[in-house]
Image (cartoon, grey):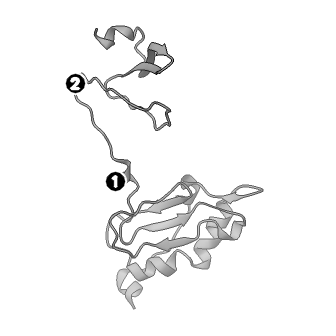
């Protein structure tokens, strides 16, 4: 049997029941070319994958990996004054990832000194902007789009190092 014939619609991702029994169920899933199966939780204890063509698996660990010098912004807090508090990762563990309550900032170049990252993003001028963009009545929070609006004064590198 070719599982492809079970999927009659050209939806990006489709699922069709193959059979159901007391021992369990079997479902055929079709993912069209250039489409993605969104992250989800399943109660399926086993998975059989039939592939036609090329499949790329993205390791989420690499997507959320934290490297030395990355900025980590606290996304949410019980008080507005604590949202967006910043830490700089200084460790050398290669297996550190950030979670859903953190926004990671990555620098594209070396124009900001490590020690300046530790103090510059906690300065009053930056903190006031972050708090202004925060939202929420019960729990204060800030999203990535609002955090991108914050203007951070960065002096020339020699001045940061002095």
Q: Left or right: where does residue 162 sit relative to residue 51?
A: right
Image quarter where the C terminus lies is: bottom left
**Residue 57 location, quadrant:** top left
* Nearest to the observer: residue 1 or residue 78: 1
User: Which residue reaches farthest right?
Assistant: 137
Q: Which residue does the image show at 58% across and 70% down from the upper left?
A: 85
**Residue 125 location, quadrant:** bottom right
* Nearest to the observer: residue 33 or residue 129: 33
User: Which residue reaches farthest left?
Assistant: 53
Q: Which residue does the image show at 73% across and 55% down from the upper left?
A: 136
User: For numbered disc 2, what is the local secondary structure?
Assistant: loop
* Nearest to the observer: residue 124 or residue 21: 21
Q: Left or right: where does residue 4 sit relative to residue 147?
A: left
Query: Which residue lies under the disc numbered 2?
Result: 53
Image quarter where the N terminus lies is: top left
Provide residue 114's location: percent of width, then percent of height. 39, 79
Please tell me how crowded label 2 is: few (under 14), some (14-19), or many (20+) other residues with Cα within 10 Å.
few
- Please tell me whether residue 162 is drawn above or below residue 96 in the rendered image: below
User: Which residue reaches farthest front?
Assistant: 22
Q: Left or right: where does residue 78 sit relative to residue 105?
A: right
* Nearest to the observer: residue 12 or residue 107: 12
**Residue 123 location, quadrant:** bottom right
Query: Which residue lies under the disc numbered 1?
Result: 62
Q: Which mark is residue 133?
A: none
Mark 1–mark 2 distance (CA, rounded to whole Å): 24 Å
Q: Earlier in the sequence, mark 1 or mark 2?
A: 2
Q: Which residue does the image show at 56% across and 77% down from the upper left?
A: 122
Pointers 1 and 2 in contact (C-beta within 8 Å): no
Q: Count the labels in the image.
A: 2
- Please tell me whether residue 123 is drawn above or below residue 149 in the rendered image: below
């Amino acid at each position: 049997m070719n599982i492809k014939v079970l999927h009659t619609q050209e939806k990006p991702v489709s699922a069709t029941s193959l059979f159901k029994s007391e021992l369990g169920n079997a479902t055929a899933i079709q993912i069209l070319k250039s489409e993605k199966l969104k992250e989800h939780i399943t109660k399926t204890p086993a998975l059989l994958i039939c592939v036609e063509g090329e499949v790329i698996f993205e390791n989420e660990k690499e997507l959320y990996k934290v490297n030395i010098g990355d900025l980590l912004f606290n996304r949410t807090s019980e008080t507005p004054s604590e949202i967006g508090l910043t830490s700089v990762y200084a460790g050398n563990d290669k297996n550190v990832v950030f979670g859903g309550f953190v926004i990671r900032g990555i620098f594209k170049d070396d124009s900001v000194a490590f020690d300046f990252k530790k103090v510059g993003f906690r300065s009053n001028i930056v903190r006031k902007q972050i708090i202004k963009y925060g939202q929420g009545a019960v729990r204060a929070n800030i999203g990535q789009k609002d955090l991108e609006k914050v203007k951070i004064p960065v002096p020339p590198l020699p001045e940061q190092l002095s």
